[in-house]
Amino acid sequence: MPVQLGSKPESDEDQIRANLSAIQEAWNGSDYATFVSYVCGKIRDKQTSTESVFTQERNVIGEIIFAIDSVTVSAAAAKVAVTETLSNRGTISETLNFVKEVDEWKLC
């Protein structure tokens, strides 16, 4: 569930979990603007990080459900082991990288 305005999860892990939930919601709702607000500058600055590429990938992959297996935070970086259920591709496991940019955790 996304974080409500005016409230901020206490721990880094809670913030990362809340952001991943918001990423899932934005992806599933085909909401590029919200989705991109949760990714790091390094990804946002890539030429392949456009709304048309997002829409193409969203159409290929379909909806996504993240199940978080673990979160490991080390200073301003974190690794999140997830099991992803992709509506058009089945289930995969992977590790997502997050970085802290201006006091906010971003998918990177």
Image (cartoon, helix red, strand yellow):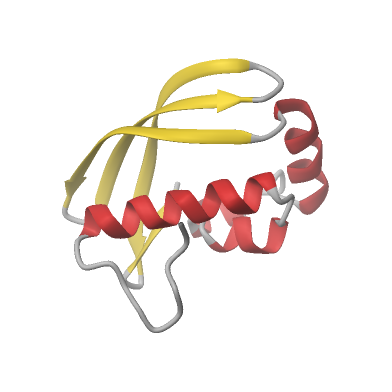
x and y, in percent, of residue 10 in the image = 21, 68
- Corner quadrant of residue 14: bottom left
In the image: residue 12, left or right of residue 81: left
In the image: residue 75, left or right of residue 90: left
Residue at 19% across, 47% down: 73
x and y, in percent, of residue 5 in the image = 45, 80
Residue at 83% across, 47% down: 52
Q: Residue furthest bottom?
A: 6
Frontmost residue, 76 versus 105 = 105
Frontmost residue, 51 versus 82 = 82
x and y, in percent, of residue 15 in the image = 31, 60
Residue at 69% across, 63% down: 33
Q: Residue furthest left?
A: 74
| Position of 50 relative to 85 (above/below) | below
- Corner quadrant of residue 54: top right
| Position of 68 relative to 106 (above/below) | above
Total numbered circles: 0
| Position of 75 relative to 96 (above/below) | below
x and y, in percent, of residue 84 in the image = 49, 27
Residue at 32% across, 73% down: 8
Q: Residue furthest front?
A: 1
